[in-house]
Amino acid sequence: MGHDDARKAAQEVSQAPDDDDAKAALRLQLRKLLTANPGLAEELVSALGGSKVVASGAGAVAIGGSVTGSTIITGSGNLVER
């Protein structure tokens, strides 16, 4: 049943991409699917050829590859001079 609900929610978003309620319904259905199937997220990442990157918490930074020669600053009220 969950797959059908997610499919219907995705169809609604495709028909009305600016509808915030439809997008919220799709997010809910996707969260339900991912909660019920913990390995599904990794399967999706693999199928899409990407890597799973998660940034969590205030000031968190997520980088899906390598970064060199960069300065990453988090927080508020910072002054950066070059």
Image: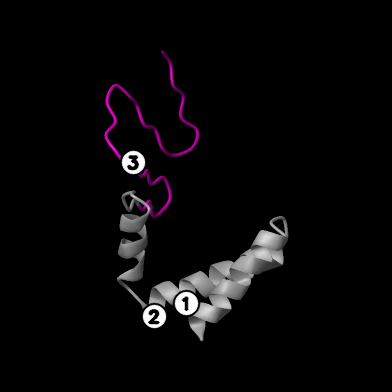
**Number of the label disc, if any, that sits on residue 36:** 2
**Residue at 68% of width from left, 67% of height from top?**
12
Magenta-span inclusion, residue 58? yes
Q: Which residue is most to the top?
A: 82
Q: Main secondary structure of the magenta part?
A: loop
Query: Looking at the image, is 21 positioned above or below residue 58?
Result: below
> Helix, strand, or loop for circle 1?
helix
> Helix, strand, or loop for circle 2?
helix
Indicate which label's residue lies in the foreground, 3 or 2: 2
The residue carrying pointer 1 sits among few (fewer than 14), some (14 to 19) or many (20 or more) residues within 10 Å by Cα, namely some
Residue type, numbered disc 3: Ile
User: Where does the magenta region start and end?
Assistant: 54-82
Task: Describe the colour scheme in one phrase.
Answer: one colour
**Residue at 38% of width from left, 51% of height from top?**
55
Residue type, numbered disc 2: Ala
Please say if the residues under marks 1 and 2 sit with CB atoms less than 8 Å apart.
Answer: yes
